[in-house]
């Protein structure tokens, strides 16, 4: 068993040239498994609660000076959602203002094809994680820019998948 601890503090935090904090997130996804063990073409994404438990979103957090952007994306997925997988090609970059802090951010999002769901992870006591279909996730996600990233992921994976089934 490996002991994982969330990073804390802002001393290694990255900022862009305009002073916006740089954050990185992932959309953890998988294809639904049938009861007989076969993998279907139905996409599921993993959403998590905010630390205060009132909002739903995808894992995201600060990109730090001692890591690549992909390493930051994977670290946030492990810390906040307890999932490990393959970080895929960037979905995009967004600029937004935090309503609670009134600060400006530069946010990057990546798809994460989930390979393992951990039983224990650093923020398991302050977050809930839930697998949902795309429509459900889009409905509950609180951040417009994460919804846009989800739309890009769905488009990228292609219309050949049964992505909009209920």
Image: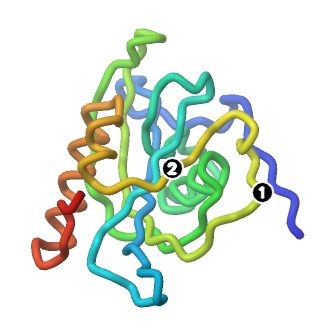
Residue tagged 1: 120
| In the rendered image, the vertical position of residue 136 relative to residue 103, given as above or below | below
Q: Is residue 96 left or right of residue 161?
A: right
Farthest left residue in view? 159
Disc number lying in front (2 or 1): 2
Label 2, secondary structure: give it: strand
Q: Residue drawn at (27%, 54%), measured in percent from left and top?
A: 134
Q: Find residue 65 and report its horizontal and vertical position in percent.
A: 60, 46
Numbered label tally = 2
The x, y position of residue 135, in whole percent, is 24, 49
Res 64 quadrant in image: top right
**Quadrant including the C terminus:** bottom left
Earlier-in-chain disc, 2 versus 1: 1
Image quadrant in which the N terminus is located:
bottom right
Looking at the picture, tell me which residue is in the foreground, 121 or 60.
121
Q: Residue visible at 50% across and 70% down?
A: 114
Q: Is residue 71 left or right of residue 93?
A: right
Measured as percent of width and height from the top left, residue 75 is found at: 62, 55
Q: Quadrant of residue 162?
A: bottom left
Badge 2 vs badge 1, beta-carbon distance below 8 Å: no
Please tell me the numbered disc located at residue 130: 2
Toward the front, the furthest residue is 35
Which residue shows up at 30% across the image and 26% down it? 96
Residue 10, relative to residue 154: is it above or below? above
Q: Nearer the viewer, residue 52 or 79?
A: 52
Q: Position of residue 34 (x, y in %)?
A: 41, 81
Q: Residues within 10 Å of mark 1 (few under 14, many from 20)?
A: some
Left or right of residue 120: residue 160: left
Task: Please report the residue visible at 51 percent of the width from the left and 49 percent of the height from the top.
Answer: 130
> Does dot 1 land on a helix, a strand or a loop?
loop
Which residue occupies the foreground of this view, 150 or 14? 150
């Amino acid at each position: 068993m490996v002991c994982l601890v969330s990073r804390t503090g802002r001393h290694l935090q990255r900022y862009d040239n305009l002073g916006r904090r740089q954050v990185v997130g992932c959309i953890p996804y998988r294809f639904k498994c049938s009861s007989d063990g076969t993998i279907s073409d139905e996409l599921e994404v993993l959403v998590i609660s905010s630390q205060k438990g009132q909002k739903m979103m995808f894992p995201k957090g600060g990109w730090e000076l001692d890591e690549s952007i992909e390493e930051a994306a994977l670290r946030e997925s492990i810390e906040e959602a307890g999932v490990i997988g393959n970080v895929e090609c960037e979905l995009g970059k967004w600029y937004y203002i935090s309503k609670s802090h009134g600060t400006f951010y530069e946010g990057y999002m990546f798809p994460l094809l989930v390979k393992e769901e951990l039983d224990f992870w650093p923020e398991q006591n302050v977050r809930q994680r839930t697998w949902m279909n795309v429509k459900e996730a889009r409905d509950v996600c609180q951040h417009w820019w994460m919804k846009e990233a989800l739309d890009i992921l769905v488009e990228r994976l292609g219309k050949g998948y049964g992505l909009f089934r209920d």
